[in-house]
Image: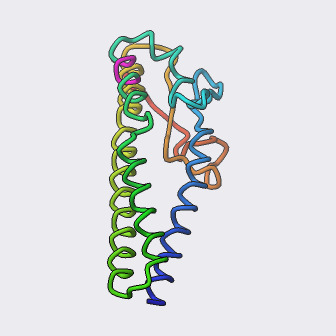
Amino acid sequence: MRNFICALTLFLSSLVMTTVHAVETCSRIALINYQEVLVDANASEKGEGLRYHLEKDPVAKQYLDTYQKNSAIRWPNAVLGTAGTGLLLFGFFKSNSQDRQVYLISGAATILVNFLVARTLEVTNEANLNRAIQEYNKRNLPKIFFNPDGNRESDAGFPGFKIGLNKDWSF
């Protein structure tokens, strides 16, 4: 039982670290015409900071709309997470050892599955934003340079970018 509580504490602390990382994603930056633009300028709509540029291209705008629609709050995830938390808490207060273990394991498993599904949907949805930027850059100027995986600590003068040079070939 002690191992289970240690594992649960480690899991919950990793969720807290993920939440801290999520705060950083609110300040994602794209480089447009040598100017930094906040990608998530609006607190409720992710990617809204690029709308002014992306709406010039209908295909890019469609991908952006899909990205924003899919990044809205999903109620099934919230309900499943609440149910898992309820099972976990109920297990802590259950006196019967066998029932307690069942509730604790099922609550932790529900929370874990919910987290993995929500994170998978979030990561796959980022492809819509990247595709919107790619479609815009195919047909429009100024180009948008955006690296969602940019690590500010390892950048060499280019905030949010791992590679600072870009070459567009045109013949």
Image coordinates for residue 60, horizontal then vertical, percent: 37, 19
Examine the structure image and report whether residue 23 is included in the region drawn in magenta: no
Q: Relative to 108, is 50 on the left or the right?
A: right
Colour approach in the figure: rainbow
The quadrant in which the C terminus is found is: top left
**Which segment did they paint magenta?**
60-64
**Which residue is nearer to you in this view: 4 or 121?**
4
Q: Residue at x 64, y 48 (%)?
A: 156
The quadrant in which the N terminus is found is: bottom left
Residue 106, picture quadrant: bottom left
25 shown above or below 145: below
Q: Residue at x 52, y 22 (%)?
A: 50
| Residue at the front extreme of this rendering | 95
29 shown above or below 66: below
Residue 72, picture quadrant: top left
Total marks placed? 0
- What main secondary structure does the magenta stretch of the protein show? helix
85 shown above or below 33: below
Q: Residue at x 37, y 64 (%)?
A: 112
**Which residue is nearer to you in this view: 32 or 76?**
76
Image coordinates for residue 121, horizontal then vertical, percent: 34, 45
Q: Residue at x 35, y 26 (%)?
A: 66
Image coordinates for residue 147, horizontal then vertical, percent: 50, 40
Image coordinates for residue 154, horizontal then vertical, percent: 61, 55
